[in-house]
Every structure is written in structure tokens, then in C-alpha cells.
Amino acid sequence: MILNPLHISARNKLILVGLFLSKFDTVGLGVLGFEGFTEAFNVLGYALGGKPASIKNYRDEFDPLFPNLRKGWHHRKPRSYCAEVLEEYGSLDIRMFSDLINSFVSYAVVESSELPPDEEGADSAFARRLITGLAAEQYFESVQADLDEFRNYDVENTTRLGCGYDFRLRNKTDNAFLAVEVKGMKDRSGGIMFTPKEYQAAAALTDRFYLFVVKNFREAPFHEIYRNPLASPLRFERKERVIVQVSWFTSI
């Protein structure tokens, strides 16, 4: 059994999510931090670089094998490559299985000093925000080439570079670049937060800085684009939070 996500193929990750949701049903949803299946399909589908419908189809593939209220694809046996995944991973308990699913997106990089966990349900809420953010980034990459604002640009993912935005888009003719910061939201409305670096980048780049917000992962994701967001109708309010960081020291 392979539990290292680096050695699990992209397709098998989607299959494993479908298997988990079929086997553990609504209890599994809660463990992963989702309120409904559609939200889980959308967030995990995009976060894993696939399609939400793929995860739903894989869940339906396994449904006849588990005691839930869905019939799934009851008219046939699971396809051979799905059966292989079931044979290898089907015996995992809910904790080991959920840890494996979470590990698929654990490489999402943030600077913890700038993005503190929520005060209530800190760990799970923080993890959900990371996964939703990654899903939004993958959503942007999937639609970027079709958007008028970004169609003639080459895309560089800068999420790990700490430059204050997620994507650098260079013009194919004059090499000028745009900066795009991507945010994801579970619902149609709510709040988003800029880190100090993101705010500074938006202030410095003005019209070359875009805020790309993916909304409504709970139901059907759609996006809104804000050019020079600090000068847009959006109103940003400065908030300060004191974080206590603990470390242990010894002399040797």
C-alpha cells in the first residue's frame, strides 16, 4: 500500500477521494470539513487539478459496495482500475484515509506568520482555507486562457516565491507583466484577507495588480475580477492581531 502522495497518480487521487466519500458518506464529509457533497466535489476536484464531476462519478462507482442511500452505478461492477484502488486502500479506517486525502493538498504553501489559524476550530478551519485557496488557484489556471484580461499572457505560478501574489503573467509581445492574487470563498459573499505582502504588492503595482476571487464553492463556482483592488469599490479595513509564538531553547 502506497501512502506517500508523491507516488500516487493524479487519477488515483481523484479515485481515492471518491472511494472515501462513498465508504464514509456524510461522516467522511464532516471529517474533511465539508458541509455537503457538492462543496467537496468542487473544492477537492479543482484542488487536485481535476474536475468536480470526476470525483462524483468515482463516488457513484463505489456506492453499490457500501451501505448508503445512493444506488450509484449499480448496473455494473467497478472498472478494473477503480477495483485496484479499492483492493489496495479499501481497508483504511476513516482517520488514516482522511489523513491520506489531506496529504494530497498539504503542499499548499502559506506563511503562517501572516495567515494565522482561526480562533475557533483552528486546525480544521485553517486546513479548509488552505484547500479552498488551492482550489481557487487551480480554477484560475483552468480558465485563464479564455479570459479577455489575461488571454495573451504566459502564466508563472509564484505562490511559493513570497512575492505578494499568486501568478505572474507576462505579455507575449513586450514581456510586461501583470500580478494576480487569487482568493477562494465557500459562499457567494463573505470576507477575504490581504496579507501585508499582498497589500504592499497591490499598492505598488496599482493597475497591474488583479484580485481574482472564486466564489460559491458550496454550489457552483464562479469568479469576479478586480483590477487595482485598492482603488476599486472594495473597502479594505486594517486589522491587527497579536500572535504568541512558542519555541524551546537549550544550550549544548
Image (cartoon, rainbow, N blue to C red):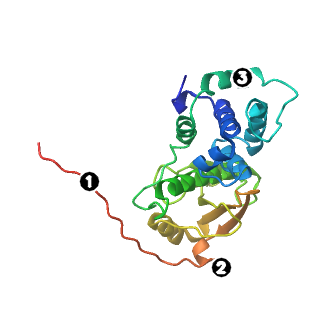
The residue singled out by tag 1 in the image is 247
In three-dimensional space, the C-alpha distance between marks 1 and 2, rounded to whole angstroms, equals 42 Å
Measured as percent of width and height from the top left, residue 66 is found at: 73, 33
The residue singled out by tag 2 in the image is 233
Give the residue drawn at x 75%, y 32%.
62
Give the residue drawn at x 77%, y 52%.
146
Q: Three-letter amino acid code at disc 2?
A: Pro
* Precedes in sequence: disc 1 or disc 2: 2
Q: Residues within 10 Å of mark 2 (few under 14, many from 20)?
A: few
Regarding mark 3 in the picture, which secondary structure is present there?
helix
Give the residue drawn at x 59%, y 52%.
33
In front here: 81 or 167? 81
- Residue 112, placed above or below residue 194: above
Q: Residue furthest left?
A: 252
Q: Residues within 10 Å of mark 3 (few under 14, many from 20)?
A: some
- Residue 195, placed above or below residue 24: below
Regarding mark 2 in the picture, which secondary structure is present there?
loop
Q: Three-letter amino acid code at disc 3?
A: Ala
Visible residue check, residue 9: yes
In three-dimensional space, the C-alpha distance between marks 3 and 2, rounded to whole angstroms, equals 52 Å
- Residue 122, placed above or below residue 190: above
Measured as percent of width and height from the top left, residue 187 is found at: 69, 64
Q: Three-letter amino acid code at disc 1?
A: Ser
The residue singled out by tag 3 in the image is 83
Regarding mark 1 in the picture, which secondary structure is present there?
loop
Measured as percent of width and height from the top left, residue 90 is found at: 63, 27
Res 86 quadrant in image: top right
